[in-house]
Amino acid sequence: MSHSTIAFQPPLTIAPAQVLRGYGLLTQVGGAIARLGQRPLVIGGSQTLVTLQPQLQPVLERESLQPRWVSYSPDCSETTLATLVQAAEQHHADVVIGMGGGKALDTAKLVAYQQQLPVVTIPTSAATCAAWTALSNVYSEQGAFQYDVALTQCPDLLILDYDLVQTAPRRTLVAGIGDAIAKWYEASVSSGHSEQSLIIAAVQQARVLRDLLFQKAAIALQEPGGQVWQEVVDATVLLAGVIGGLGGAQCRTVAAHAVHNGLTHLLASHSTLHGEKVAYGILVQLRLEEIVQGNRLAATARQQLLKFYSEIGLPQSLDDLGLAAVSIADLQQAATIACADHSDIHRLPFTVEPAQLMAAMVSTTAREVRGEERGERSEQLTPHPLPLTPYSPHEVTL
Ligand SMILES: [Zn+2]
């Protein structure tokens, strides 16, 4: 037996070192933060700081910590990062705390990574799994997606205070559900045939996560703060993070996030949340499989998603994203960016041209054209993930 390929692989970044969950947790976390450092740099959005600084300041003071509070506005951009790294140095910060939505947390994680400091994440909504993952997205000053950075570890401490999350607009949880179900539609395409244990586990968990949200999302949204709501928050903030952690860099996003990334270059898209654009992007991805491959199961999956989206209020079309009046030129720009050489859209098992993508983007709500109408035969069916199929183990050949 030879071990000819002994080489370092990228570090596994599966989970935060510690995850604390509860109601009214923010007032009790001083000790846990004090174990990581004495001089926190607290990074949040301007509004989050106004609301939460009065709550967290006395908690930190009780532990004799000396925080400095800074805003990440206007975005998690290279300029903001440079300013905040400088702020960390001036303050002699020995721990970074990120408080807010995905962008605030991404900024805090990157500043901590660049300064080699421990980081605490305190999500104020369930809109993304950014509190969990070892990944940060970097945007331009204008909010256009630039690139992501793989970090060497997950946060040192994640504080999930359900009271904070409950004060966030309903729409943030809906967006979190959209971002979470995308894991299945993307991971099953990019990594569905992997032989690697951790990646097989990640893809299967993505299916479990999707099914769980199909079952519980509508109930959760009816009863914020209830037991089902709490389970759905755990699913979008924690379980979605577990999948990103297990799957790592190889369990990549595909067209849904590529479409999101393209859309962020349109100013008019900035009024919608990450997960809303991603949810729309799933429909575009399925539509591409229909248009380019003639994949009928993708068409069925899209119809089922449209029904789910209408139940919980996820956007189904450019119109729903507030882009009804988008010009052809703008749409072309977004499509061209989404189809750039390095884009994850090329993880689809066929090539995609901007013109095909544009066609998919404007037809996400198209009626399903039945195979018989097109004169197709059922033998032409290709395997495709179908929502609400009973859970079955990953195919194993013995
Ligand atoms: Zn996402």
Image: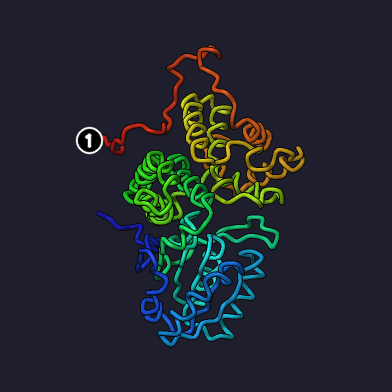
Q: Quadrant of residue 3?
A: bottom left
Q: Position of residue 168 (x, y in %)?
A: 51, 57
Q: Position of residue 235 (x, y in %)?
A: 39, 51
Q: Residue at x 60, y 57 (%)?
A: 147
Does residue 20 sit above or below 196 in this rendering?
below
Q: Is mark 1 within 8 Å of ligand 1?
A: no
Please say whether residue 244 is visible from this viewpoint.
no
Name of the residue lying farthest toward the left: 398
Drawn side of residue 332 relative to residue 107, left or right: right
The amino acid sitting under disc 1 is: Leu
Q: Nearer the viewer, residue 362 or 237?
A: 237
Q: Residue at x 53, y 75 (%)?
A: 53
Q: Nearer the viewer, residue 224 or 89?
A: 224
Does residue 396 sit above or below 271 in this rendering?
above
**Count of number-bearing discs:** 1
Quadrant, the N terminus: bottom left
Q: Position of residue 96 (x, y in %)?
A: 49, 75
Quadrant, the C terminus: top left
Drawn side of residue 276 relative to residue 4, left or right: right
Does residue 228 sit above or below 42 in this rendering?
above
Does residue 244 sit above or below 213 in this rendering?
below
Q: Secondary structure at mark 1?
A: loop
Q: Residue at x 40, y 42 (%)?
A: 219
Q: Position of residue 287 (x, y in %)?
A: 56, 31
Q: Residue at x 67, y 48 (%)?
A: 269
Q: Label 1 crowding class (10 Å Cα cut-off): few <14, some 14-19, many 20+?
A: few
Please say whether residue 173 is visible from this viewpoint.
yes
Drawn side of residue 144 relative to residue 118, left or right: right
Q: Which residue is mark 1?
A: 398
Q: Quadrant of residue 31?
A: bottom left
